[in-house]
Every structure is written in structure tokens, then in C-alpha cells.
């Protein structure tokens, strides 16, 4: 006897016993939160671009610009992080890189996850308490059931983490790229420098012959 497949449909969730007494509108009224949120959303774009320096190092390259194009070609934000993690852990050219690269990628993933919550969540203001709420649920029927209060301080902490990661990238991968670029220039110049003494000697001999 064949059992027909069970049809999946939406089921109304059970009503919450402790429904908060709120009157919410879908807007952010707190000016400090708006300012901090704008800093996080705009600043993350530049942090993501700066992670191209990390990718350039992991690719064994000296070209941050080319790495930036690679980053943009990978449309999935999580996919970019996965590529960097895979290169760091599996590529032979990166076997001597220290744990600071693991920490950078881990911190960037954490920042990216939190940023996405703020960017894609539903924001509310409780008119009665003037509190700002963030609803992270995907089920629209559960709106405000699992919402949490967000303050400007929460967003400012994330912004500080982003700035700190900027500094780490600047002191680490970007300095490494400068060293590689300097070494590459020296390698290109060495053949020219090695030819100069012979060329000078030939010039002197030709002058003596004349």
C-alpha cells in the first residue's frame, strides 16, 4: 500500500502567552541609532573592499586591484569568505601564514553576519516606550514575537570592530603586499644592474681602441 506524500502547508503558530504591550510603527525614530546604522552599512562596503588585500596575499599575488575584481566576481558574500578560508587552509603557498589570518577571516565573517541582520531585519519603534526594536524572524506572522531592543551603543560596538579590522589588515596583509612588491621590483632590476659593468667595460675598450 502506497502512502500518499504528506503535503506541506503553512501552520499558524501557537499564540504567545506573554504578548508585550506595545504600539509599534515600522520606522526608526531614534536619531542616534539612524546615525550609527548608516555608519555600519556604509562602512562595511569599504571593509569588504579592503579584504581584497587579504585575498591578494592568499593568492600569492602583489596586485590588490586584481584581487578586488576576483572578489566582485564572486557574487555571494559568504562565498567570498569561503574562498579565502579554503585558500588559507589548503593552498601550499599559504602554509607559513600565521594564525592572524584565521582570526581576520573569522572576524570578518562575524561582522558580515551581524551587519546582514541589521541590514535585512525589520525595524520598529514602540511609540509608548520610544524603544527601537529589531525583528529578525523570517515568518511575517511572528512579527515582534522575538524582536529585541537595539541601542545606538550596539551599533557603535560593531562599527568599532570594523575599524579595528581595518587596522589589522593595514598592519598585516597590506604590509605583506608592500614587501612582495618591493621584492618583485628588485628582481626585475637585478638583470639590468648585472649588465651595466659589462657595458661600461665595453665602452672603455672601444674608447681605448680608437
Image: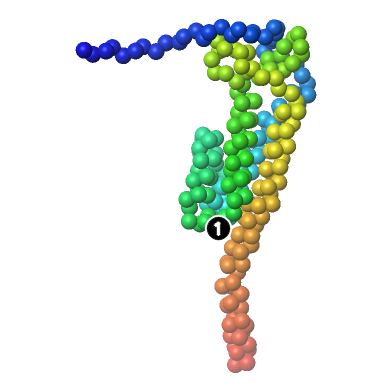
Q: In the image, is residue 175 above or below residue 120?
A: below
Q: Given the current orientation, which residue lies at the most extreme left position? A: 1
The image shows residue 103 at horizontal and vertical percentages of 61, 45
Question: Can you give x and y, in whole percent of width and height, for residue 83 in the image?
Answer: 50, 43
Q: How many marks?
A: 1
**Residue at image mark 1:** 96
Q: Quadrant of residue 162?
A: top right
**In the rendered view of the protein, which quadrant contains the N terminus?**
top left
**Quarter occupied by residue 189:** bottom right
Q: Assess disc 1: are there few (<14), some (14-19) or many (≥20) residues with their C-alpha within 10 Å of its C-alpha.
A: few
- At 51% across and 40% down in the image, what residue appears? 82
Taking the spot 76% from the left edge, 28% from the top edge, the residue there is: 153
Residue 62 percent coordinates (x, y): 58, 55
- Front-most of residues 182 and 98: 98
In the picture as drawn, the residue positioned furthest to the right comes out as 32
Provide the secondary structure element on which disc 1 rests: loop
Instruction: State which quarter of the image contains the C terminus.
Output: bottom right
Question: Farthest residue in the front direction?
Answer: 17
Residue situated in front as seen by the camera: 46 or 156: 156
- Name the residue furthest bottom: 209
In this picture, is 186 found above or below 43? below
Snapshot colouring: rainbow
Position of residue 123 relative to residue 49, above or below, is above
Q: Is residue 65 visible?
A: no
Frontmost residue, 12 versus 198: 12
Q: Is residue 95 visible?
A: yes
Residue drawn at x 52%, y 45% is 85
The residue shown at (55%, 58%) is: 96
Amino acid at each position: 500500500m502506497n502512502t500518499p506524500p504528506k503535503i506541506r502547508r503553512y501552520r499558524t503558530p501557537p499564540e504567545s502567552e506573554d504578548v508585550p504591550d506595545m504600539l509599534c510603527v515600522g520606522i526608526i525614530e531614534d536619531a542616534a541609532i539612524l546615525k550609527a546604522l548608516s555608519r555600519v552599512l556604509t562602512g562595511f562596503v569599504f571593509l569588504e573592499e579592503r579584504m581584497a588585500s587579504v585575498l591578494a596575499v592568499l593568492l600569492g599575488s602583489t596586485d590588490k586591484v586584481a584581487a578586488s575584481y576576483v572578489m566582485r566576481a564572486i557574487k555571494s558574500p559568504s562565498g567570498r569568505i569561503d574562498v579565502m578560508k579554503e585558500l588559507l587552509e589548503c593552498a601550499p603557498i599559504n602554509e607559513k601564514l600565521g594564525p592572524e589570518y584565521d582570526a581576520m577571516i573569522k572576524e570578518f565573517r562575524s561582522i558580515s553576519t551581524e551587519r546582514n541582520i541589521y541590514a535585512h531585519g525589520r525595524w520598529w519603534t514602540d511609540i509608548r516606550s520610544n524603544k527601537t526594536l529589531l525583528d529578525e524572524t523570517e515568518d511575517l506572522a511572528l512579527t515582534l514575537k522575538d524582536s529585541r531592543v537595539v541601542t545606538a551603543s550596539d551599533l557603535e560596538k560593531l562599527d568599532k570592530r570594523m575599524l579595528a579590522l581595518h587596522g589589522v589588515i593595514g598592519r598585516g596583509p597590506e604590509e605583506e603586499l608592500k614587501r612582495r612588491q618591493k621584492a618583485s621590483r628588485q628582481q626585475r632590476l637585478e638583470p639590468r644592474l648585472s649588465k651595466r659593468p659589462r657595458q661600461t667595460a665595453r665602452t672603455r675598450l672601444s674608447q681605448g681602441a680608437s
